[in-house]
Structure formats: C-alpha cells, structure tokens
Amino acid sequence: MDRKIYSVSQVNRYAKGLFEMDVILNSLWVHGEISNLKVHTSGHIYFTLKDSQAAISSVMFASYADMMPFELENGMDVFVCGYVSLYEKTGQYQFYAQIVEPVGNGALNVAFEQLKKKLEAEGLFDADFKRPIKENPNTVAVITSPTGAAVRDVINIISRRNPSVKIVVVPVLVQGESAPDTIVSAIRDVNEWGKADTIILGRGGGSAEDLWPFNSENVARAIFASEIPVISAVGHETDFTIADFVADLRAPTPSAAAELAVSDKGQMAQNVNNLLSRLNLLIDNYINSKIDRNNAVFGPAVLRRIEEKIANGQILNDKAVSAINNYAERKFESCQMEIGMLIQKLELISPMQVLKRGYVLVYNGDMKNIVSSKNIGEGDELNLRFYDGHIPVVVKRRNDING
C-alpha cells in the first residue's frame, strides 16, 4: 500500500488553512486576562490570554497596537477581537488580536487613567510648577477652533470686561487624529511670538472622543513646557481632561476662562473707589482717635493745671528778676562810691594838684621831664607846663644855685 508522506511545513500550512477557513475562528471576541506581556522593539505586543482553566498565546502587530488609545498591562481583564491561526514555523496556533477593550471601563477611560498616573508621577501636575495668571494682561492668545461658539464667547466676554485687552485667536483643530499636532504647534508658536501674557486653550462640549485630543500626551507636555501661563477650558464643568491637570489654571468652560483671564475694568474701578472710601474712613478714625486721646490728655482740668503752673512760674520769674535788679542797683551804687573814692585819692596825688599850688613842670625839646638845672644849657628850648597850659621858653642865661 502506497504511503503519502508530507513535510512538516506542509502539515502546518494545511492546518493553518483549516484555521483560516473556519468561520468562527476567522473572526471572534475572546474574554480573558492578560499575562506574560512583552512589548517588542518592533512595536509588536506578545502576551498570553487566559482564564481559570486555559490559556492561549496571543500577538498584536504594531499596526494595530499603534491605534490603541491605552497600553496593555498584566492582569488587565479584556475583551479581545481577532482571529485564530497557526504559526507555521513552530506549529503553534495563536490568537491574533486586532482590537482590545477593557472589561468594565472603556478604552478611553483606561487610557486617560494610565496617562494621568504617568504624568502625575513625573510631576507635571505639581502645584510648584503652576505659573500665576497675570491679573491685568495686555494680550490674550486663544487657541481653539475659529468657527465654534466657544471662541465667540471668549471674545465677547474679554471685550466687555476690558476693551483694552488685545485678543489673538490661534486657529487649531479641536477633534480628530490631527488635532493634537495642531494644538502642540499653536502652543509653541505663541511662545515663540512671546507677546501674549496668557493662553486660553479649549473648546466647547462634546463626547469623550471629541475631547480626546486634550488628553494627548504631546499636548500635555507642550502645556507644561509653555513659558506663558495656560488656562485650560475644555468642554463643560463636568468634563476633565489631562490638559486641565497640567495647565496653570483650569476653567470649567471657555466663558469662565475669559473671566479668569481678564479682570473686569468696571469692577476694578469700583474696587479702587471702595479702597479709597475705606482709606478715608481709616484716616478719619485715626484723626478722631488722636483728637480723643489729646482731649483725654489735654482736657480742661489738665489745661487749667498747666495754666496754673505757667502762672506760678511767671510769678517766680518776676520775683527773681526783681531780686536781680535790686541786687544790680545796689552793686552799681556801691561801685560808684568806690570809684568816687578812688578818683579822690588819685586827685590828691595827681601832678595837676601840685601845679595848682604854683609849681611848674619843665620839658626839653624832646618832651622829656627835666628835674635838674644841670641838664639845661643856654639857648635850650624848653616847655613849661602849668596846670592850665604850656609856655615855650628859650634859656638866655642860667644861674646856678651855688654861684
């Protein structure tokens, strides 16, 4: 009896064909838990899909893995859509995954939590990195769709609150696969421009899929890297995105972002007036308190005591002045008497008194007093001093007493 002999590759190829022709195995959903997860450098993901009684080797090629919004993790309970086939090289059959959905939580929700956990661990949500929003900006850059209602609301509110603020609308896509790239580029462009004081990033409400660009990791990192403070205003008040956590300030709606970005000029003026009123009131209270204090310190009774002390002091001063004047008068009279006595004494010994008794003083031409006839010669010019005047004389002859 002739035997037909097949090679191993033929057997595997035939078996693979059976798998591919099976209607059920060609496209089915499988429920299981992920284990032995490995991500190859090529982007392919290898894992085991198991339940309590069995397991099946599985693979997801990079082309499908790139489309997943979240990352697979060991222990994750999932529904997997794909097909069963045989890997000819090893003869092992395996499950080829094309779509993976987490059980209980939607794929986007899982992706959101994974990215949130990752960025939080890196510190992108830390309050220390939050920049303060300028209270009175000159220019506000609004990164959003140029045709939506959100941008009109933002422009109207900013213009009403402070017409002097310049508004620059930077148009971007706010949904779809290309949206994250346009948002990242817009944030970088505004920073390179460098003339905006604040960035408002947002859009109106929508489904989780519509808002998904604001959960992009690239958008989150662009917000974190921005040197200009960013206000995130995505969707409605109940909507939260990764952009909200990274931004310097989260606004529940685009309209609220406009109010947070720009102070109300009218309210500012009212605040100034209120402050001035309070200041005037404080000044009045301060002055009144000082007046009350002065009245307490310098009241009528106190003033009377001060007046009495001043009057008593004046009386003592007047007495002291009178005593000083009396003493001075007595001292002056005493001095006058002493001076008179001294004058009398001087007059008694004065040469003038001697001259009045008939004596004469003789002076030579140099007005030197001559006390001896020996000092006089014939022809000398002399000056005779009487008590009441001078007489010049010339010696014609001299007579000595002795001869």
Image: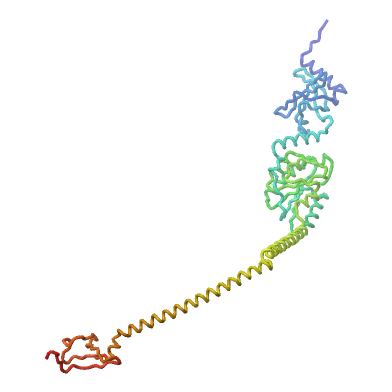
Measuring 69% from the left and 43% from the top, which residue is drawn there?
Answer: 129
Which quarter shows the C terminus? Answer: bottom left
- Residue nearer the viewer, 386 or 210: 386
How many dots with numbers?
Answer: 0
Q: Position of residue 97 (x, y in %)?
A: 80, 27
Q: Position of residue 49 (x, y in %)?
A: 80, 23
Q: Where is residue 173 in the image (x, y as percent from the top left)?
A: 78, 45
Which residue sits furthest left? 403
Which residue sits furthest bottom? 396
Image side of residue 132 versus residue 362, left or right: right
* Picture quadrant of residue 315: bottom right
* Picture quadrant of residue 27: top right
Relative to 164, is 202 above or below?
above
Q: Position of residue 301 (x, y in %)?
A: 68, 67
Relative to 379, is 287 above or below?
above
Relative to 288, is 64 above or below?
above
Which residue sits furthest right? 23
- Residue nearer the viewer, 271 or 399: 399
Q: Which colour scheme is used?
A: rainbow
- Residue nearer the viewer, 357 or 200: 357
Measuring 82% from the left and 6% from the top, which residue is drawn there?
Answer: 2
Relative to 345, is 227 above or below?
above
Which quarter shows the N terminus? Answer: top right
